[in-house]
Amino acid sequence: MNKIQVKVMRKQGCGDLPLPQYMSEAASGMDLYAAVDKAVQLERSEIKLIPTGIHIELPLGYEAQVRPRSGLALKYGVTLVNTPGTIDSDYRGEVGIILCNFGKERFTVERGMRIAQLIIQPVFRAELIEVDCLEETRRGAGGFGHTGH
């Protein structure tokens, strides 16, 4: 597997929380932990920003994506509103997770709970070339559900 170095800085008062970490040898995402000072109640359909207690410095040409944890989604209906969330290489603020409770019951976020995954990806920047027409395809402008599936 390819590796890059990503600098991480803990927010003051978060030394008790683990740094993001891969939970298996082949995992593509590192678990992120809730850095809440006290338990946070997430009511049904409620959205809250949950801090992670870390700041990261990505190398130029990389981004971090924040994605939901499948276990929280399946068991409790808790997921991320903006998934994947994008962290650009020039962002230095605290990594925050926008959690939403789509479940049937109130969900409690506790300090140190694994709440999301962090994936590091290379970034490709597109050079847009304006043209007068585009190449025709069989699909054409067909949108959602146009194939009948």
Image (spheres, rainbow, N blue to C red):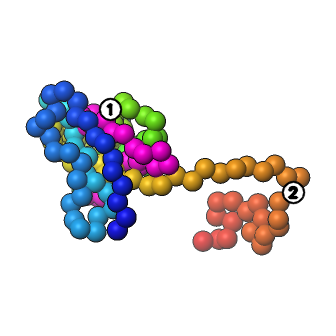
Q: Secondary structure at mark 1?
A: strand
The magenta span reads: 49-74
Label 1 sits on what residue type? Glu
Q: Residue at x 32, y 57 (%)?
A: 29
Q: Residue 108 occupies which quadrant of the picture?
A: top left
Total label count?
Answer: 2
Decide whether residue 50 is among the magenta residues.
yes
Disc 1 crowd rating (10 Å Cα; few below 14, some 14-19, many 20+) is some
Dot 1 corresponds to which residue?
Answer: 94
Q: Is residue 136 left or right of residue 20?
A: right
Q: Between 61 and 47, which is closer to the camera in this rendering?
A: 61
Q: Secondary structure at mark 2?
A: loop
Q: Residue 109 occupies which quadrant of the picture?
A: top left
Label 2 sits on what residue type? Cys
Q: Between 25 and 105, which is closer to the camera in this rendering?
A: 25
Q: Residue at x 29, y 64 (%)?
A: 27
Q: Is residue 52 left or right of residue 17?
A: right
Q: Which quadrant is the C terminus positioned in?
A: bottom right
Q: Is residue 127 left or right of residue 82?
A: right
Up/down of 8 relative to 130, above or below: above
State how far apart marks 1 and 2 are (Cα): 44 Å
Q: Between 139 and 16, which is closer to the camera in this rendering?
A: 16
